[in-house]
């Protein structure tokens, strides 16, 4: 399936987002006095580009490409920070690239939407309403019952809240992004209450998501949180997008299977990168040899 012009634009924005976010990790790690504001600026620009990408391309194309930020970060660290990229890290990067390419080449075309009211219609259909209600109930149960008891010991609690909330955040971001895109094209969408409703949803979900993601990062090892969160967030976001925008309705089984294979390939590369990212930097302890005579003398004394 050939890429539409909107998909190309969304792809370009998603990749640029990964470049900026990946670069921000390196800037932060350099620890320079002037790098603080620069690092934050890179993150902001990256997030804006990612936000805009959802206005042009389907979530199944944009969301998995977030893994590219890990690749850019690893490659820049290799050349700038002199952190050796282990052979397994190179393999992880290659897997992410192969998976991303597979998804990009087979991603469905973006639905042609002319008004935010059309997005509202999709969001209020029974399928997505049921999904939204399930997410709200699960998040409420996790926060009220599970967080006080198991939040400090079970990673899945905090990450589950972030991922479930994040899937609704992306749907809201996509709606607001489409509204902004149409507004810039001359059709003001901010005269409709639906646009403001989606904006409130985005703000509320973002605040909740950031709060519990920070708690997860403060409580557990970042090397464990990052891949688990990426897998859950990306999977739930794609699932929500399929329900709301029915992105697979225009594709055959072969195309869908290819996209799933690409997604699994990215997940494999992401886990491999995180599991082996420090392997090339760990000093090898020299072996300690003992002689029988020394052992005999020590035992005699």
Image (spheres, rainbow, N blue to C red):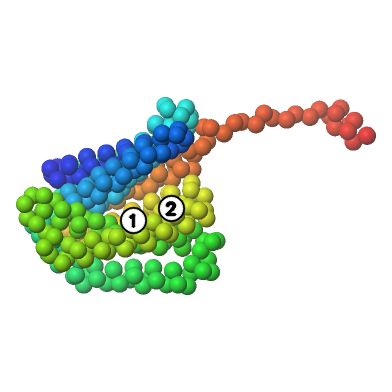
Q: Secondary structure at mark 2?
A: helix
What is the x, y in percent for residue 125? 18, 70
Residue 228: mark: 2
Left/right of residue 142 with respect to residue 196 in the rendered view:
right
Name the residue at 48% across, 38% down: 277
Q: Give the class, few, some or many, for how many residues have Cα within 10 Å of label 1's Cα (few <14, many ≥20).
A: some
**Extreme residue toward the left, this view:** 186
The residue lying at 48 percent from left, 30 percent from top is 83
Q: Is 2 drawn above or below residue 166 in the view shown?
A: above
Image coordinates for residue 228, horizontal then vertical, percent: 43, 53
Q: Quadrant of residue 33?
A: top left
Q: Is residue 22 visible?
A: no
Residue that label 1 marks: 235
Where residue 42 appears, as percent x and y from the top left, is 33, 39
Q: Position of residue 124 (x, y in %)?
A: 19, 70
Q: How many marks?
A: 2
Camera sees residue 42: yes
Q: Is residue 171 above or below residue 88?
A: below
Q: In whole angstroms, how far apart are the C-alphas of marks 2 and 1?
A: 11 Å
Quick one: label 2 or label 1, which is nearer the N terminus? 2
Residue for point 19% across, 58% down: 175
Relative height, residue 153 to residue 74 (above, below): below
Q: Dot 2: within a 10 Å radius of its alpha carbon, few (fewer than 14), some, or many (20 or more) residues?
A: many
Residue sitting nearer the eye, 155 or 101 = 155
Query: Compared to 55, does 278 lie above or below?
Result: above
Q: State left or right for residue 298 relative to residue 158.
A: right
Quarter occupied by the C terminus: top right
- Circle 1 sits in a helix, a strand or a loop, which is it? helix
């Amino acid at each position: 399936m050939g890429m539409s012009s909107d998909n190309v634009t969304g792809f370009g924005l998603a990749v640029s987002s990964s470049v900026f976010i990946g670069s921000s990790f390196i800037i932060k790690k350099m620890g320079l006095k002037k790098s603080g504001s620069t690092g934050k600026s890179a993150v902001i620009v990256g997030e804006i580009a990612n936000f805009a990408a959802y206005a042009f391309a389907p979530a199944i194309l944009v969301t998995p490409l977030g893994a590219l930020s890990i690749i850019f970060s690893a490659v820049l660290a290799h050349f700038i920070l002199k952190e050796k990229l282990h052979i397994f890290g190179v393999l992880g990067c290659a897997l992410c690239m192969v998976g991303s390419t597979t998804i990009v080449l087979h991603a469905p075309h973006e639905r042609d939407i002319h008004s935010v009211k059309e997005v509202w219609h999709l969001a209020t259909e029974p399928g997505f309403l049921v999904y939204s209600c399930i997410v709200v109930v699960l998040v409420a149960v996790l926060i009220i019952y599970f967080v006080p008891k198991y939040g400090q010991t079970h990673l899945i609690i905090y990450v589950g809240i972030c991922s479930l909330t994040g899937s609704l955040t992306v749907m809201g971001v996509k709606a607001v992004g489409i509204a902004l895109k149409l507004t810039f094209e001359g059709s003001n969408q901010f005269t409709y209450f639906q646009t403001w409703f989606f904006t409130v949803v985005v703000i509320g979900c973002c605040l909740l998501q950031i709060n519990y993601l920070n708690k997860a990062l403060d409580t557990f090892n970042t090397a464990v949180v990052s891949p688990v969160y990426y897998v859950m967030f990306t999977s739930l976001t794609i699932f929500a997008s399929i329900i709301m925008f029915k992105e697979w309705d225009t594709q055959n089984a072969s195309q869908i299977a290819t996209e799933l294979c690409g997604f699994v390939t990215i997940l494999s590369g992401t886990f491999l990168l995180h599991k082996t990212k420090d392997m090339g930097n760990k000093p090898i302890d020299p072996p300690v040899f003992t002689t029988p005579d020394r052992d005999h003398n020590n035992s005699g004394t």
